[in-house]
């Protein structure tokens, strides 16, 4: 029978110098963290980059003694992942660049799908409208919508991650939907 070591114990062991403890934590939570990042980015390569960046931050924070022990290692890591995704989203939405060269063929990287080009364009325009609408929301409401719909967190997980009650998280989602409807009506946006 194998004894499962808690996250807290593994963190303590890592801080005490046991490098293998960090590896155990990464393996234990890899799928959840990777999945959360991928659900936000929908890009395998970007997900891999952000995943590595998250655990580099974890190592740095642990070494700096900036992890407070509340037994919530996974929500702490997911919060860092969420913040990195948001930062990356903000950074990339500000910089739009298209690089072409004779060696680069755009059609080699576009996914081949049975949907026609018009449907793809309409789908992308819809996603762009939704992203733009999310930017109209107050930060707390936007955060709950992103965590719920892009990261696919439960309201309990959102509550743990953001440090608010489940009712507050539910309320923020409700107000986010109300505000989104209002913006859609005010701006006469058609989907």
Image (spheres, rainbow, N blue to C red):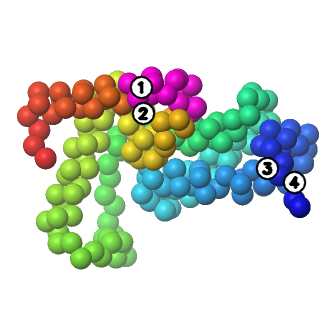
Return the residue nearer the eye: 150 or 155: 155
Label 3, residues with CA under 10 Å away: few <14, some 14-19, many ≥20? many
Examine the rendered structure and indicate whether residue 81 appears above or below residue 43.
Answer: above
Give the x, y percent position of residue 166.
49, 28
> Quarter-wise, where is residue 185 in the image?
top left
* Label 2 vs label 3, nearer the camera: 2
Left or right of 154 in this view: 131: left
Name which residue lies at 32% across and 48% down.
Answer: 96
Would you name the residue on which mark 1 appears? Answer: 140
Tag 3 near tag 4, CB within 8 Å: no
Dot 1: few (<14), some (14–19), or many (≥20) neighbours within 10 Å?
Answer: few
Is label 1 in contact with label 3 (beta carbons under 8 Å)? no
Rounded to the nearest whole Å, what is the CA distance between mark 2 and mark 3? 29 Å
Residue wearing tag 3: 22
Q: Would you say the residues marked 1 and 2 are in contact, meaning their CB atoms lie under 8 Å apart?
A: yes
| Magenta region includes residue 163 | yes
- Is 108 in front, or is 8? 8
Q: CA distance from mark 3 to mark 4?
A: 17 Å
Disc 2, disc 3: CB below 8 Å?
Answer: no
Which residue: 34% across, 43% down? 93
**Mark 2 and 4 residues: CB-CB less than 8 Å, in contact?**
no
Q: Secondary structure at mark 4?
A: loop
Q: Which mark is residue 59?
A: none
Looking at the rendered structure, which numbered label has been put on residue 3?
4
- Determine the residue positioned at 52% across, 24% down: 165
Q: Position of residue 158 (x, y in %)?
A: 51, 35
Q: Residues within 10 Å of mark 2 (few under 14, many from 20)?
A: many
Provide the residue span drawn in magenta: 159-171
> Secondary structure under badge 1?
helix
Which corner quadrant of the image does residue 6 belong to? top right
The answer to if 32 sits in the magenta stretch is: no
Residue pointed to by mark 2:
144
């Amino acid at each position: 029978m194998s004894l499962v070591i808690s996250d807290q114990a593994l963190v303590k062991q890592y801080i005490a110098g046991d490098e293998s403890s960090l590896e155990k934590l990464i393996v234990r939570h890899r799928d959840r963290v990777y999945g959360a990042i991928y659900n936000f980015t929908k890009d395998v390569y970007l997900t891999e980059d952000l995943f590595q960046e998250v655990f580099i931050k974890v190592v740095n924070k642990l070494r700096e003694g900036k992890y407070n022990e509340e037994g919530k290692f996974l929500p702490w890591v997911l919060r860092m992942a969420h913040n990195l995704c948001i930062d990356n989203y903000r950074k990339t939405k500000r910089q739009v660049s298209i690089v072409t060269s004779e060696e680069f063929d755009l059609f080699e990287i576009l996914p081949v799908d049975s949907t026609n080009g018009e449907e793809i364009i309409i789908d992308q325009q819809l996603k762009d409208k939704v992203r733009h609408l999310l930017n109209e929301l107050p930060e707390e409401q936007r955060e709950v919508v992103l965590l719920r719909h892009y990261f696919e967190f439960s309201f309990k997980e959102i509550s743990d991650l953001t440090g608010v009650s489940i009712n507050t998280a539910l309320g923020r989602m409700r107000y986010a939907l109300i505000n989104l409807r209002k913006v859609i009506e005010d701006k006469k946006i058609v989907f």
